[in-house]
Amino acid sequence: MGFLLLEVPLLVAIVIATGYYCFLLPPKYPENIPAIPFWVALLPFFKDVDQSDIFRTYIDKPLRKHGAVKLFFGAQWNVLVHRPAYMAEVFKDEDLFEKSGNQKKIPHSVLAQFLGDNIISAHGSTWKTYQSVVKPGLQRNFDGTIVANNAHKLTRLLRDAQKTAGSKGVPVQDFLQRYSVANCSEGVLQTQFHPLESASAPINVMQSQVKMQIFKPIFMNFPVLDRLPFPSRTRARDVVRQFKNELKRALVESHDKVPRGSDGLGRRMLDAAESGVLTEQQLLDNLTVAFVAGQENPQLAMTSMLYLLAKHPSSLADMPHLTSVIYESLRLFPPIGQLINRRATRDTFLGGDEVLIPEGTYLGYNCFSTNRDPDAWGPDADEFVPARWGKTVDEIQTHYRRRRARGEFISFHGGRRSCLGERFALLQLRITLVVLIQTFKWSLDPTWTDRMTPVLSNAGISIFHRFQASFIHDGKGTLLFTSGPRKQLLEDNWEVINSFIHLQDSSGLRLYQQCQLQDGVAKGLLLAAESKDNSVGEDFEYFFVQLILDQLDFALYNPTEAPSSPSPHVRVTGKIVSLFDSYLRYQGNEDKWEAGGRRVFEERVRHFTSQGAQIQLCLPAFPCKSTNTNKVTGTSPDRGEALALNHLHSFVEAVEKIYKPGAKLWVISDGHVFSDCIGVDDAVVDRYGEELKEMNREIGLARGRLDRVDFRSLVDLFKLTDDTVAEEVKSIAKSLRIPAITHHVRTKETEEAELCRQILMAGTQPLESVARDRLKSNDESLVALYRGFSRFMLEDLELHPTTLTQTKSQRKKLSTKVAFEMILMLFPCFVRLSIHAHNNAGPKFGIQLFDASKVRVVEDLSPEGIPMASEDLLHIPTPWHNSVVEMEGCDYLLVTKAKVATHAIACGAMGGEKAVKEPVLLLQRAMSFKPVEEESFYDKAYQQFTQVFAPLPVLVSVGLIIAYRMKV
């Protein structure tokens, strides 16, 4: 028995070692170039990481230094070439470095089934046969009016999308895909798919499904797995088969009346198949590759071109020729970044005798790298400089031919096997650029993050990060209203999406619906299907989504009737916007209210005024009192909270005077989201919240109306206020085994608050690896904020029981850990009003909590003193981080740090006490005032911390689904 137990692990070890030696161990030759670790190719499978980051971190430096590297891809080791001189050799001798595509390299793979044996990857006599059919169809004179007509259709689609988006950016990728499909199908194949007329055209939907199924890192790097009967790969093969058959069906149907002998590529392919020159399979394979290359490559090129022009708008003013802009865009962002489809037919060398290439070795090249070679293009090789191509047409074309011959510009590849579709691609790019530049002014969405790899989210795989859109339909299939980051996708594909019950198996999407029984109206969520295993599982997802759907509120009061035209409501809407601007809006640094924020705010208000409905406002605030006694004098709401609540009530009153339905302001008050991070017991948070509600009720009574301002918390959102429901939720949550939360600071948690935190984190937290990557990025504001949190925790936890027995080094380590725990919660949530000083471009708008006619927020004990502000952390002063000082002989109440007043008393500059009935510091002048120490950086960091995280209780209700869509 002992021998058997020993043999099993030994056998496993031998199998692993053999597999590593045979497949993963880099080959000995070529000897003088390095090997990129095989696991680099697998990084996208284990975490969300951009291709450009992988390239810069692991490949770029050795590739440029040695001119070539050994790279693991497609279940084998390849030589990836960079040096232009080497590239010229590879392109020149096609018999020595023969084409050998996936149909030869990995014939059993789904990718090989998709593209098959085609003109791009074939060699020898087979290639010559394909060339005789395809080349005349691609190198003829094309009719530019087809592209021009489609370009004008594209501009109309983009204009409509921009109207819908308002001041927000419009994702152009889907539009450009539909546009390039139209150009390729009509201009090259003479086939009609009608992609611009309908986003849900079969070809659009099927193409998206193919992309989702094929390009998965684990199967790309280990195609042997395609041999195994995984359900996902079976579905992938079915999708590929359907796609290819749809291409042929449309081709045959479109050419029923096209005479034989036409020079169009579609007609030539059909004639070749009917005459026996091409087999049925060869027709399908070459038709597929013609469509994919003719559609996707121009789409990628156009996307890059528009991105560069939006990023460098000045280049439009001084560009000498359109062609130079196109060439420069193709140089920096080649449509095919990397291609490995050459095979050495015998032992040979690159660069004379520099790099030995053994027979049978697969070679490829990275266009992105070679096109940016600094030895060829100079120190500004990574910069967008269209003028580098020349000043005249002749100069540009001469420069272009020279660069291609030297292997320095390889976007269209090179030699006899250069791209046959180059002529049509350049024609398409020229016409597109002219039409779009004449029609629009381009700029990058300021929230855009540069990435080479397209993703639905760069933050995680939780339900929150996979959220695509929410919707209402009439119960019979008619879509009434949509919201969310990809609502356009939902609207364009609604007929297809609504026909599925579960979408995740076929399209990468997941649909949830819930019917409102009283009127039959249904509401729902559209999520991206999980790309990786989620520790909480599908049962939790269903539970969490149901919680969300129960709370989902679009603020549509008669959803079967669309909001009326805005024209009757323009006047009152404008008055409300102006009231907010003058009464409540906080103006911080780089304010963009007039540059577009006002328009966004007006759109939010109009959502309600167009329905004649009460305006709903949402403000995450009032979490709990700071633990720092240098800032505040206690744990209960005091004069500061009373002043802030009165100011909010008075704003709502002012709205009522100009708009009869009035407004309601929801305060999302819940310090439970992060109280465990800062050492505040849940019971203390609960007591603060209850006392705050009582204070708000008394203010409402005094002002004659109780419902102007109201409160919600995590406990409300998760329905834990109802004892019966609470017990049911607790029971379900326990059975789902929701992951526990690690508490680095000792606090006393209540069962309800801890359960809320667990549910919130399980449903919304980002990938930890992404959070760490963000902290390693060049986002200076984020990194500075994180460091501020660490420094703040080091000071604020100094007297906490957790840290009393720790050394300074241990406390510093703990503070960094806690700060990282908090930063995990920092990612986007969509709120409307905020106590954080945003630039007011929308959708969040910062507000001031104190009435400036009665209160001065200052750094010292003078109403004319230095205003409290922080340029680095952009905080707005709040009552839960400050104290109110009433000073004898002063016309204003002062809001400042408690230590400013207590220090003044201690040093004899002032006399005073803390009032008991009305919590406020009362000061009398004792002698001439002496300056006191300035507020420390740590105090400022602490205030920023709570202001950033105050919105987090509505990550679920507002951020994930715009649940309280109280948009103003």
Image (spheres, rainbow, N blue to C red):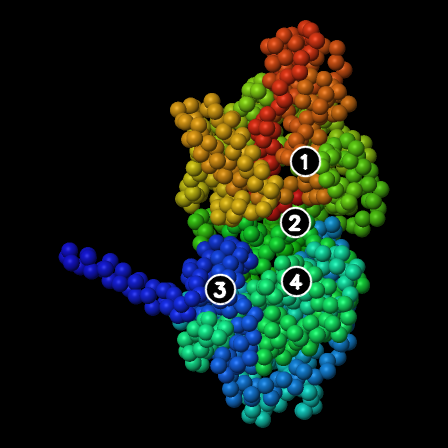
Is residue 945 something one can see in this rendering?
A: yes
- Evaluate whether residue 237 shows in this view: no
Residue 243: % across, % down: 56, 74
Marks 2 & 1, CB-CB < 8 Å contact? no
Q: In this view, does 360 lie to the left or right of 916?
A: left
State which mark lies toward you, 4 or 2: 4
Considering depth in this image, is 892 or 407 the residue closer to the camera?
407
Residue type at mark 3 is His
Q: Which residue, given by chain and number where applicable, does mark 1 sit on?
A: 837
Per the image, the residue denoted by label 4 is: 304
Q: In which quarter of the image is the C terminus?
A: top right
Q: Regarding mark 4 in the picture, which secondary structure is present there?
A: helix
Whichever of callouts 4 and 2 sits on the residue coming sooner in the sequence is 4
Q: In this view, does 111 lie to the left or right of 422?
A: left
Whether the residues at callouts 4 and 2 have beta carbons within 8 Å, the answer is: no
Q: Residue 916, relative to residue 329: is it above or below? A: above
Q: Name the residue under label 3.
A: 66
Q: Distance between the residues labelled 3 and 4?
A: 29 Å
* First reached walking from the N terminus: tag 4 or tag 1: 4
**Residue in the image at 60% along x and 42% along y:** 780
Q: Name the residue under label 2.
A: 447
Could you tell me which quadrant the N terminus lies in?
bottom left
Mark 2 vs mark 3, foreground winner is 3
Residue 790: x, y in percent? 52, 34
Reading the chain from its start, which is encountered first: label 3 or label 1?
3
Q: Is residue 98 above or below residue 498?
A: below
Q: In this view, does 406 lie above or below 717?
A: below
| 3D distance between C-alphas at marks 2 and 3 | 38 Å
Q: How would you rate the neighbour count of disc 1 (Cα within 10 Å): few for under 14, some for 14-19, many for 20 or more?
A: many
Residue flagged by tag 4: what amino acid is it? Ser
